[in-house]
Image (spheres, rainbow, N blue to C red):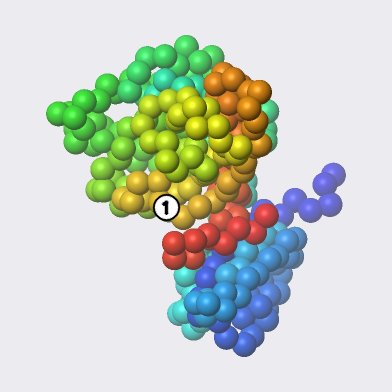
Amino acid sequence: MPQNTAPTYVLTLSCPDRLGLVHAVSGFLLERAGNIEEAAQFNDHDTGLFFMRVQFACSSHSHEQLQADLAVLADTLQLQWKLHATAQPMRTVLLVSQQGHCLNDLLFRWKSGVLPLDIRAIISNHRDFYQLAASYNIPFHHIPVTAATKAQVEARQLDIIEGEGAELVVLARYMQILSNDLCQKLAGRAINIHHSFLPSFKGAKPYYQAHDRGVKLIGATAHYVTADLDEGPIIEQDVARVDHSMTVEDLTALGRDTESQVLARAVKWHSEHRVLLNGHKTVIFK
């Protein structure tokens, strides 16, 4: 039999920094027979904030009782906190348009057991990937969008997201700009991926523009979605070196690989509750 079959939880928290915070949290768990399995902390001297992530096992108290007790502790220490049961994979909805490299990668990693997700639905403004969704037995919602129907489309999308109880929304190359209203409603739980280190190349076919200018680096950035386009808190970035011998097709393929890997890491860290928001930045306990 396994040595430890107690339910495990992840507690994430932030608060104004002060003496004794680690002692207070560890003491709280000790009093409830919680066994700490993993712990990490960060003191941001610029903002005076303290961040912490603790994974622990506890069989003596229920999830509900732990939450109730944490609420009392939070009042004392001014905590912003969340408690997650690790046995519950994160409910997720994926959005995609016509580029499927990130979608394919996420679905494969999820099916392989690498990502602790419960993918509830795929939403797209095109029909391209309905067969892919069916092969994974995931509901596929085709919702075409035009400038005239954007508000109605976003209302339908939000109905699906909320109806599935999604804790995470991933824009896996969804090529529509979300409204400020939808961005606010998805704040802190929507992740986007885009090409980075190509700041001058906007619009269609950025890798064609990059090739034409002879860039030496291409890359990708995964970030939380905000009303400021592509300027949300950054979760992960990576780059790949390129040179004059590479074709547009080479750059595109390398760029798509980089996008897929960066997005997968960001989704994994978020789904494992390793990412804490720190204003316009993030704290990531890898």
- Residue 146 placed where, x, y %? 21, 25
Label count reads: 1
Front-lying residue, 38 or 210: 210
Q: Is residue 89 left or right of residue 175?
A: right
- Above or below for 12 versus 220: below
- Which residue, given by chain and number where applicable, does mark 1 sit on? 232
Q: Is residue 267 visible?
A: no
63 left or right of 286 in image = left
Q: Residue at x 49, y 27 (%)?
A: 212
Q: Nearer the viewer, residue 123 or 206?
A: 206
At mark 1, the secondary structure is loop
Q: Which image quadrant is residue 151 in?
A: top left
Residue furthest out toward the top: 131
Say what amino acid the circle numbered 1 marks. Answer: Gly
Percent position of residue 133, x then y: 48, 19
Name the residue: 47% across, 79% down. Answer: 78
Q: Quadrant of residue 239?
A: top right
Residue 54: image location, x then y, percent: 65, 64
